Every structure is written in structure tokens, then in C-alpha cells.
């Protein structure tokens, strides 16, 4: 079914695409900054932060499950794992941020590249869901799959616009 680029549904889908770019860009920038922060922060400061963050809850209730879980995570968080997460977040966030910028600027080759990158994220998140059972990853995979559809739709409209010199929405 082909949707007229001027219909209310087409305008809503275009708005949804732009809103998803804004959200993805914001999260990608935060992810990149968090990765950079992990990269430059000494490991002992990360551990001290988690001790500080959980101290109040544990003094109120020494059996606070969430605070104990965070404290356990901090204790079992070695320095080399911090380095891995820092580089992962930095690379993952920077890749997504670059993708968002290129899509916002309507760079033609960025559309298939973005669909490929998003498909990789969906594959990874789906695999992690199957092995770990995280519904957060399943939700992220579904949102990335929706983003693939929106990117594909915008790409086809861009190709149509450049072929017929149709005005942009």
C-alpha cells in the first residue's frame, strides 16, 4: 500500500521519524558522554561513587535489595571491565550519533547504512534477549525494528523526491 506523501498519515509518519531521530540523538550523545566519563574516571572513583550512592539506603535498611544489588555490582566491577564498557559506550554512542546526524541532513547513502546498523543492533539485542531474557533488550529491538521501517520509508520518499523533484514535506 502506497501512502500519499501529503496525507495526514504520511505527515504523522514523517513527524515520528524526526521525533525518533531526536530521541536517538539525545540518547546517543548521553551514551557517548557516559562512555567518555567512564574512560577518564579512575576505577576507584567509580567504586566510591557506588558506595556513596548506596550508603544512605543501606544505613536506613541493611537488607535493601536494590542497594545490596548495586553494591554487589560495584564490588564485582573490575577495572578492565570498566575500560571495555567505556570503549563500548563511546563507540556505540558515537556510531549512533553520526547516523542520526547524517539522516537528519538527508545524506542519501546514510539511509541504507543506518538500516544495516540498526539491523545489527536488532540482531544483537534479540540474541541477548534469548540468552539473558532481558525484556528491556526486547523492547529496544522492537523500537529499532520500527526505526528501520521509518528509515526505509523516508529513504523511498527521498529517492522519489530526487527523481521527480517533488517538494519536501
Image (cartoon, grey):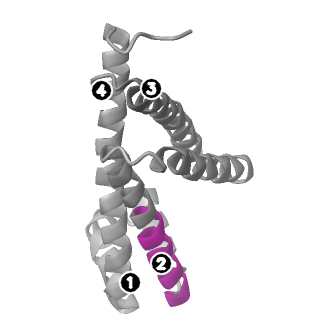
Q: Residues within 10 Å of mark 3 (few under 14, many from 20)?
A: few
Q: Are marks 1 and 2 in contact (CB under 8 Å)?
A: yes
Tell me if 45 is positioned left or right of 2 in this view: left
Residue picked out by circle 2: 87
Q: Are marks 4 and 3 in contact (CB under 8 Å)?
A: no
| Mark in front: 4 vs 2 | 4
- Camera-nearest residue between 96 and 36: 96
Tell me if 53 is positioned left or right of 10 in this view: left
Q: Residue at left 30%, top 61%?
A: 30
- Residue 160's disc number: 3
Q: Main secondary structure of the magenta part?
A: helix
Q: Quadrant of the C terminus?
A: top left
Q: Earlier in the sequence, mark 4 or mark 2?
A: 4
Q: Is 80 inside the magenta-drawn segment?
A: yes
Tell me if 71 is positioned left or right of 117 in this view: left
Residue picked out by circle 1: 39
Q: Residue at left 28%, top 43%?
A: 22
- Residue 15's disc number: 4
Q: Earlier in the sequence, mark 1 or mark 2?
A: 1
Q: CA distance from mark 4 to mark 2?
A: 33 Å
Q: Is residue 6 above or below residue 135?
A: above
- Residue 60's disc number: none
**For the residue labelled by badge 2, is the local secondary structure a helix, a strand or a loop?**
helix
Please provide the residue range marked out in magenta.
Answer: 79-93
Amino acid at each position: 500500500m502506497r501512502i500519499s506523501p501529503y496525507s495526514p498519515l504520511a505527515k504523522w509518519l514523517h513527524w515520528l521519524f524526526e521525533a525518533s531521530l531526536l530521541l536517538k540523538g539525545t540518547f546517543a550523545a548521553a551514551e557517548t558522554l557516559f562512555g567518555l566519563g567512564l574512560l577518564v574516571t579512575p576505577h576507584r572513583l567509580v567504586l566510591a561513587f557506588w558506595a556513596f550512592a548506596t550508603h544512605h539506603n543501606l544505613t536506613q535498611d541493611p537488607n535493601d535489595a536494590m542497594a545490596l544489588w548495586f553494591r554487589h555490582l560495584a564490588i564485582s566491577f573490575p577495572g578492565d571491565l570498566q575500560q571495555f564498557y567505556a570503549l563500548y559506550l563511546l563507540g556505540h554512542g558515537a556510531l549512533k550519533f553520526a547516523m542520526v546526524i547524517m539522516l537528519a541532513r538527508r545524506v542519501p547513502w546514510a539511509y541504507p547504512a543506518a538500516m544495516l546498523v540498526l539491523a545489527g543492533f536488532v540482531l544483537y539485542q534479540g540474541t541477548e534477549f534469548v540468552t539473558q531474557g532481558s525484556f528491556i533488550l526486547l523492547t529496544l529491538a522492537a523500537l529499532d525494528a520500527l526505526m528501520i521501517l521509518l528509515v526505509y520509508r523516508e529513504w523511498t520518499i527521498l529517492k522519489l523526491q530526487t527523481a521527480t523533484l517533488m517538494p519536501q514535506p
